[in-house]
Amino acid sequence: MTTPIYRIATLSDVDGIAECAAEAMMEDDLFGALWPRRKEYPEQFVAYFRRRARERILDHSVVNLVSEIPVQENGKEVLKVVGMAQWQKFGKPTVETGWSPVKAVGKRLIGFQDWAYSWFENDTASDPEAVAGFVRDFTEMEHKYWVKDGKEHERWHLQILAVHSIARRRGIGGRLVELGVERAKRDGCDASLEASPMGLPLYKSKGFEVLDTYMMKVKGPDGQPIPSPILMWKNPDVQR
Ligand SMILES: CC(C)(COP(=O)(O)OP(=O)(O)OC[C@H]1O[C@@H](n2cnc3c(N)ncnc32)[C@H](O)[C@@H]1OP(=O)(O)O)[C@@H](O)C(=O)NCCC(=O)NCCS
């Protein structure tokens, strides 16, 4: 089996990232609650991840990682994005690779383009009430755990991690997590994330500890609130 490639994503990866994330999140309980009709309208689900990927690639505080493996498509070998992770720096302003005024202008243009699309695109796959509830829950959770005296805890935070089902249990998710932890070590700060139940064993195996479990008010397929364990990897070198 060939060794997967790991690299920082560029704008040309947006489609690959969106397809990988949408495929991986199809069975995720939280996305299931927010996007109850995603299986009927998979193209809307992909479009959501495409918008999100574009926005994040142009965000100077985010490092977007992808993992690729060679696959056969129409009789040809091509590289396919099978893993994606978005690590965002909070706290002290950073220090991001590849940020430029060109990206800043691009971000504005893309923001405008997405706003314009939102007038024409159908969005029948998501549940707007659940999405609004989730945004409220998430903001509350982030504030509770990561903001103290109005200051963000300095950390690299894993916003999203997804590995395509064709490439799971080959260490790709684990490597994408390690790369963020290594960056946090280099920057002398912690690493943090909120896990879904499916991601929990992986994060624990990489040394993250559960600080608490936040119950999302958004309800899962069994009608129960979705648990979201809050995890943190503590860098012993950091002065707290
Ligand atoms: C969770 C996810 C990212 C794991 O990616 P992956 O590339 O398969 O993970 P790895 O191969 O690096 O796994 C590393 C270790 O994590 C643990 N692990 C990973 N997936 C697991 C699973 N489904 N059940 C139990 N343990 C698991 C194992 O200890 C594994 O080591 P092993 O294979 O030697 O036993 C992937 O399954 C996924 O994208 N799921 C859907 C989206 C999702 O839940 N994302 C997480 C959001 S918080």
Image (tube, grey):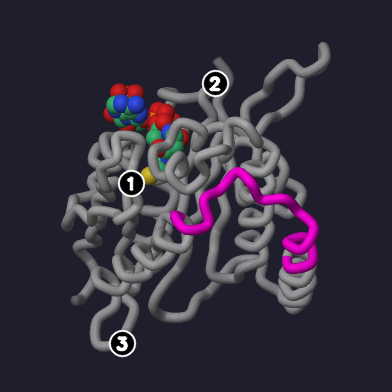
The residue sitting at the top extreme is: 75
Nearest to the eye among marks 1 and 3: give it.
1
Q: Earlier in the sequence, mark 2 or mark 3?
A: 3
Q: Which quarter shows the N terminus?
A: top right
Residue 102 percent location from the top left of the image: 78, 74
What residue do we see at 76% from left, 53% from top? 121
Residue 39 percent location from the top left of the image: 58, 31
Circle 2: residue type: Ile
Residue 150 falls in image quadrant = bottom left
Q: Which quarter shows the C terminus?
A: bottom left
The verdict on residue 118 being magenta is: yes
Q: CA distance from mark 2 to mark 1?
A: 28 Å
Task: Report which residue position mark 3 lands on.
Answer: 150
Relative to residue 121, is residue 46 depicted above or below? above
Residue 163 percent location from the top left of the image: 50, 34
User: Foreground residue, 227 or 220?
Assistant: 220
Q: Mark 2 touching mark 1, by CB under 8 A?
A: no
Mark 1 packing: few (<14 Cα in 10 Å), some, or many (20+)? some
Asked if the residue at label 1 sits under 8 Å from ligand 1, the reply is: no
Task: Report which residue position mark 1 lands on.
Answer: 219
Circle 1: residue type: Lys
Q: CA distance from mark 2 to mark 3?
A: 43 Å
Circle 3: residue type: Gly
* SS at badge 3: loop
The verdict on residue 145 being magenta is: no
Which residues, given as a range, are shown in magenta? 115-130
Ligand 1 shown in quarter: top left
Residue 166: image tag: 2
* SS at badge 2: helix
Q: Is residue 181 visible?
A: yes
User: Foreground residue, 171 or 46?
Assistant: 46
